[in-house]
Image: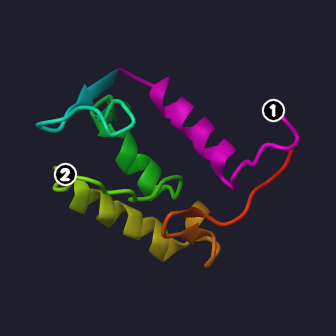
């Protein structure tokens, strides 16, 4: 990694947790009705590991947030907001600093 590359706080931890979860069991995908790609061509899917929502887990653990909602409604949007609110109330990880999460991103970078 370049020493001039901006790395957001919790990015490494979130990456490692995501990797750990994905490797821990059988991965399945669920797609929304309609488009399966976003405006950048990225695949959009709900990810499950042994039947447990990967997105829900990362939200509850404060490694993710609900953001960039471009074309609602989404099947699990309200559930994801509830899971995010659990981490917010407990001030876990990205929610542990009152000014870290911004409307369109995060505040600050770490340099390695």
Q: Bounds of the magenta span?
A: 1-26
Q: Is residue 92 visible?
A: no
Quarter of the figure that contains the C terminus: top right
Q: Relative to 72, is 89 above or below?
A: below
| Residue hosting label 1 | 1
In the rendered structure, which disc, 1 or 2, sits on the residue that comes first in sequence?
1
- Residue 38 position by quadrant: top left
Q: Relative to 43, is 32 above or below?
A: below
| Label 1: how many Cα within 10 Å (few below 14, some 14–19, many 20+) | few
Q: Residue extending furthest front?
A: 39
Q: Residue at x 43, y 55 (%)?
A: 59
Q: Which mark is residue 74?
A: 2
Q: Position of residue 67 (x, y in %)?
A: 40, 59
Q: Relative to 73, is 11 above or below?
A: above
- Is 84 on the left-hand or right-hand side of 33? right
Q: Position of residue 65 (x, y in %)?
A: 45, 58
Secondary structure of residue under mark 1: loop
Secondary structure of residue under mark 2: loop
Which colour style is shown? Answer: rainbow
Q: Position of residue 6 (x, y in %)?
A: 75, 48
Quarter of the figure that contains the N terminus: top right
Q: Residue at x 16, y 49 (%)?
A: 75
Q: Is residue 14 visible?
A: yes
Q: Residue at x 57, y 39 (%)?
A: 17
Q: Residue at x 17, y 38 (%)?
A: 32
Residue 4 vs residue 57, the one in the foreground: 4
Q: Which mark is residue 68?
A: none
């Amino acid at each position: 990694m370049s020493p001039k590359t901006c790395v957001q706080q919790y990015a490494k931890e979130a990456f490692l947790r995501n990797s750990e979860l994905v490797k821990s069991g059988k991965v399945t995908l669920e797609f929304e009705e309609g488009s399966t790609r976003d405006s950048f061509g990225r695949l959009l899917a709900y990810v499950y590991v042994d039947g447990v929502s990967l997105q829900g887990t990362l939200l509850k653990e404060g490694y993710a947030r609900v953001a960039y909602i471009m074309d609602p409604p989404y099947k699990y949007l309200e559930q994801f907001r509830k899971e995010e609110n659990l981490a917010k109330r407990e001030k876990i990880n990205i929610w542990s600093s009152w000014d870290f999460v911004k409307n369109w991103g995060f505040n600050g970078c770490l340099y390695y």
